[in-house]
Amino acid sequence: MARDHTLQGAERRAAALLLAPSLTGTTLFLLLPFAETVRRSLFDGRGIRFVGLTNYRAVVENTAFRMAVANTARFIAVCLPLLLGISLLLALGIRALRTPHREGGGRVFKTTFLLPMGIPVASIVLLWQVLFAKAGIFNTFLVSLGKNPVDFMGTGAAFWVLIATYLWKNTGYDMILWLAGRDAIPQDLYEAAAVDGANGWQAFRWITVPNLMPTFVLVTILSLLNCFKAFREAYLVAGAYPHQSIYQLQHLFNNWFLQLDLARLSAAAVMVAGALLVLILLVQKIRTGEET
């Protein structure tokens, strides 16, 4: 017993030692800065005088904040279902190509769809300009058909351009995650279902979907976080004040930071972090509900 207790103590010390660098970095670079952000959200711009919820009230009453929240929510509501659905269909399609005689087909598709992840943001911005400028490829094609050119980045069309870019860049990444989840499902389950007379849809509904729920949670959370990274392309193409249809929370935060409006910026950041936490908990709740 004493020897077992000694071994357990040694294992705990080894685990603590291995986790120490990661926990230290998380504390120094994430937890402490966020705690300071929460504190600053309750104080004035200099961080000296306590003002309570005044900064939060100012953020909620701000017209630009409301527009940015609406645009960001709309972007997420459109992009997330499309990305999850398209990437899942592609993953299942590639999985169907994996036969003993066609092993190479899946690899070619995976490589093709992952290429956008390796393209620098500056190159993507250049692609935007070539395709969607007033004298770009798309407008040249429209003019050749006798149509009027479209100001893609100066009208509401900018929103759909941003969505297309997000889907193009992130579909391959999510597809790989879905494939990993599908490969983890034992093939014996499908063989047993086939013996019992289940068709393809029934196998998908009662075997694939329930067993992909852990992957669904992971893919949804990562895709949700990646929605906020679309700001880079929009900012480089249209600047700090783009068309209002793509003016998102990141634009607002960037502008408030440049204005050194740290009080409202801190309050808005805390509110967004809380909203993301609620969304993540809802996704996990969906998974729990499916399992029960």
Image (cartoon, helix red, strand yellow):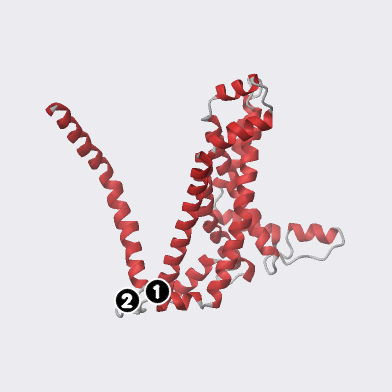
**Which residue is more in the foreground, 260 or 128?**
260
Q: Quadrant of the N terminus?
A: top left
The residue type indicated by label 1 comes to Leu
The image quadrant that residue 265 belongs to is bottom left
Residue on which disc 2 sits: 47
Nearer to the camera, 7 or 149: 7
The answer to whether one can see residue 222 in this image is: no
Vertical order, 54 against 108 (above or below) = below
**x and y percent of residue 50 in the render?**
31, 78
Would you call the spot at circle 1 few (<14 residues within 10 Å), some (14-19), or many (20 or more)? Answer: many
Quarter of the rendering containing residue 72: bottom right
Q: Is residue 37 visible?
A: yes
Q: How far across and how far down the image is residue 150, in percent?
A: 76, 65
Q: Position of residue 46 (x, y in %)?
A: 33, 78
Residue 135 position within the rendered picture, expressed as x and y whole percent measured from the top left:
74, 63
Q: Are marks 1 and 2 in contact (CB under 8 Å)?
A: yes
Rendered position, 178 above or below 53: above
Closer to us: 196 or 267: 196
Residue pushed farthest right?
146
Q: CA distance from mark 1 to mark 2?
A: 9 Å
Question: Residue 262 has which mark?
Answer: 1
As rendered, which of 62 and 163 lies closer to the eye? Answer: 62
| Above-or-below relation of 37 to 223 | below
Q: Secondary structure at mark 1?
A: helix
